Amino acid sequence: MASVRRLVIDVLKPHDPTLLEFTERVTETDSVNGVSSSLIELDQEVQNVKITFEGEDMDFEVIQETVEELGGTVHSVDQVACGEYIVEDRRTLQDS
Amino acid sequence: MASVRRLVIDVLKPHDPTLLEFTERVTETDSVNGVSSSLIELDQEVQNVKITFEGEDMDFEVIQETVEELGGTVHSVDQVACGEYIVEDRRTLQDS
Amino acid sequence: MASVRRLVIDVLKPHDPTLLEFTERVTETDSVNGVSSSLIELDQEVQNVKITFEGEDMDFEVIQETVEELGGTVHSVDQVACGEYIVEDRRTLQDS
Amino acid sequence: MASVRRLVIDVLKPHDPTLLEFTERVTETDSVNGVSSSLIELDQEVQNVKITFEGEDMDFEVIQETVEELGGTVHSVDQVACGEYIVEDRRTLQDS
Amino acid sequence: MASVRRLVIDVLKPHDPTLLEFTERVTETDSVNGVSSSLIELDQEVQNVKITFEGEDMDFEVIQETVEELGGTVHSVDQVACGEYIVEDRRTLQDS
Amino acid sequence: MASVRRLVIDVLKPHDPTLLEFTERVTETDSVNGVSSSLIELDQEVQNVKITFEGEDMDFEVIQETVEELGGTVHSVDQVACGEYIVEDRRTLQDS
Amino acid sequence: MASVRRLVIDVLKPHDPTLLEFTERVTETDSVNGVSSSLIELDQEVQNVKITFEGEDMDFEVIQETVEELGGTVHSVDQVACGEYIVEDRRTLQDS
């Protein structure tokens, strides 16, 4: 299968573990080289965060399991880059 | 024929296979070096995604067949770059 | 005459040939090194596309003939760069 | 645990110590290589500031203790980057 | 006199010669290394175009003569860069 | 103490000395390598200016004294970067 | 005194000499390496222009004398950069 090199997911997570612990933990997933998490919004119960994973051949199922073990749910997969290198998404005249 | 080096297409696909599997599969198409897929919007039945392909001499018919085998349809071809290198689309005074 | 190094044109074309075939074909024009085509809009009859050509000494008449052989018409020439290198159009305080 | 390489936090702090002293002090925290603080807004009692920390393996608890010793409180953790290098957060079609 | 290295002018020209021929011709002016022309707007009689000239020591009078020989008129000179290298215009807090 | 490498301050100053003299004078402060001053707005009595200082280990008290000797007052400290290198403030999803 | 390396001024000038001649003339001022002039607006009597000067140790009084000899007046000094290198003005959260 083609190597998954970048994944951007939208996650709902409880306040505990914190965004920091959550990010440290998902970064430890096999095949993940680096992760950046950004807070989108929060309410009393949950945090909605955007998480970007980079690696050379990532296994999404293992990532998703880790997210769920930590009490989170993957709300949507917003971007996926596969192949020999990371193809950047570019704005076209069709993007609103 | 001139080498097709970048293709941006707008695709409607069912929820299954997921965007991840879909992207992995289309990346395996012969002559494709890398793919980036971005979720535009989704409803209960379908996902509308923007897919950027890069390669050195890509065969669109094979790409389109793979998209269709996976249950997707190419809604439109939004950008095509051909030739010895990738010519970037630049904003002109005529772009709205 | 000065070398034409970049040309941006606005083209109306029928749906057949597709944007992909159309772009492949105009890229094969003598003296053209690379082409990027972007869909602006489409209706039932025609596609309105923006096409950027780069080369070292391009012959617009031959490009225009190719566009017309493919059923297209050059609606306007939006940008032309000539000379020893490509001068980039820069935004000034007079641009709206 | 994965190395924490960048942290962006939102802090409420009293006017004393000043933003300068506050930034100098939190930069001295073990494992922090550099810090940038930006004033968001202020009223008579407090300053709301955004603080970006970079380091090779930062310990947030120690950072948080330093913030609190200086009279500040961490209002939210807005971004966390962990791993072998800093993954940049990129805008996707899902970002509003 | 100081070397003129970049000139941006606003020109009104008839439809004939075309923007392509017009650009090729003004690029041939002595001391001009490269030219980029962009269509601003057009009506039935005239085209309003923005033309950027780069060279190492350009003579505006000769450029203007060429523009006029081709039926055009220089409506305004919008930017001039002189000296040992091209100083870029940068946005300041005073730019609206 | 951690090295202060960049400081952005908001200053109110009288018209005399001019922004030029003012900037030259504050640049001469020990440990300052370079300064950029930008006019925000002015009225009959005062000028409101944004001043960016860069250096390897700057002493704000000395800078502030110089500003005051020149008749200015530091209205606010808007950004501070300390440490081994300048950490850039980056836009997050929490910035309005 | 600290070296003045960049100056951005707002100038009102008569139509004669032209912006081109005006720019060539001010570029010849001692210690100026390069100048970029941009037209802001014009009416029947005057042109309002933004002029950016770069040099290694510029003397503003001489620049101002040249501007006045050419019939212009310095309406405001909008940006000044002094020191060992040019410090760039960066957008902060306090910039409107």
Image: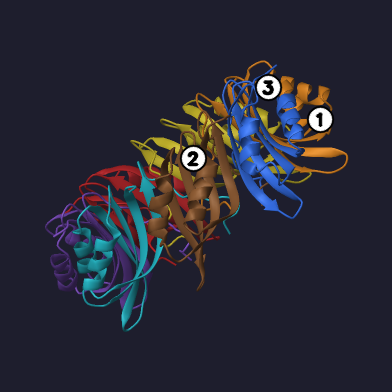
Chain colours: A red, B purple, C cyan, D yellow, E brown, F orange, G blue
- Image coordinates of residue F89 in percent, x first then y, are 54, 40
Residue labelled with disc 3: F27
Looking at the image, is mark 2 or mark 1 nearer the viewer? Answer: 1
SS at badge 2 = strand
- Image coordinates of residue E46 in percent, x first then y, are 51, 67
- Image coordinates of residue F31 in percent, x first then y, are 63, 17
* Residue C47 circle label: none
User: Which residue is painted at 72% across and 30% down in the image?
Assistant: G66
| Amino acid tagged 2 | Leu
Q: Nearer the viewer, residue G32 or D80?
A: G32
Number of other residues with Cα within 10 Å of mark 2, as a class: few under 14, some 14 to 19, many 20 or more = many
SS at badge 1 = loop
Number of other residues with Cα within 10 Å of mark 1, as a class: few under 14, some 14 to 19, many 20 or more = many
Q: Nearer the viewer, residue C78 or E69?
A: E69
Q: Give above or below for G85 relative to B90.
A: above
How far, Cα to Cα, is label 2 from label 1?
35 Å
| Amino acid tagged 1 | Gly
The residue lying furthest to the front in this view is E69
- The reply to the same-chain question for discs 2 and 1 is no
The residue lying furthest to the bottom in this view is C44
Residue labelled with disc 2: D7
- Image coordinates of residue C82 in percent, x first then y, are 37, 49
* Residue F72 circle label: 1
Number of other residues with Cα within 10 Å of mark 3, as a class: few under 14, some 14 to 19, many 20 or more = many
Q: Is residue B1 left or right of residue F3?
A: left
The residue lying furthest to the right in this view is F45
Dots 3, 2 in contact, CB < 8 A: no
Q: Is residue G69 left or right of residue C60?
A: right
Q: Quadrant of the N terminus of chain F?
A: top right
